[in-house]
Image (cartoon, grey):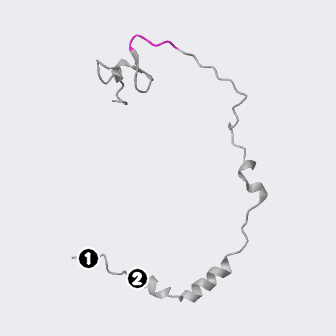
Amino acid sequence: MATDYDAPRVTESDESTDTSLEQLTASRKDTQSPVVDVEDTDTAESFELPGADLSGEELTVRVLPKQADEFTCTSCFLVYHRSRLADATQLICRGCA
């Protein structure tokens, strides 16, 4: 059975809720308030995010020297294991190749 998708679909709920444009605009104006409900305490400056201020923190990172089976990509300058080498003649990783 062929279906015409361009034809308007009419259901029982569409027929029962048939209201005029004037009634819809009048009811919309009744339910909306003209005043925006914004308080001074709702500004973005009042929210304190956990862990947002890290200016007083010191980080301790253990740095290891480049190992014999690692290389530095000449495109992105990241250190990778030799299994990520795209070409044996050039020091470029698979992500940059």
Q: Is residue 67 magenta?
A: yes
Q: Quarter of the image for the N terminus: give it.
A: bottom left
Q: Is residue 15 magenta?
A: no
Question: x and y percent of residue 6 in the render?
Answer: 31, 77
Question: x and y percent of residue 36 in the render?
Answer: 71, 68
The amino acid type found where label 1 is placed reads Thr
Q: Nearer the viewer, residue 97 or 66?
A: 97
Can you tell which quarter of the image residue 53 is in?
top right
Disc number lying in front (1 or 2): 1
Q: Which residues are magenta?
A: 64-69
Residue placed furthest toward the top: 68
Q: Quarter of the image for the C terminus: give it.
A: top left
Q: Main secondary structure of the magenta part?
A: loop
Q: Earlier in the sequence, mark 1 or mark 2?
A: 1
Question: x and y percent of residue 39 in the render?
Answer: 77, 60
Residue at (26, 76) in percent of width and height: 3
Residue at (40, 10) in percent of width and height: 68
Residue placed furthest toward the right: 40
Can you tell which quarter of the image residue 79 is in?
top left
Horizontal side of 7 relative to 38 (left or right) equals left
Residue at (67, 81) in percent of width and height: 30
Can you tell which quarter of the image residue 56 is in?
top right
The amino acid type found where label 2 is placed reads Thr
Q: Nearer the viewer, residue 72 or 10?
A: 72
Q: Which residue is mark 2?
A: 11
Disc assigned to residue 3: 1
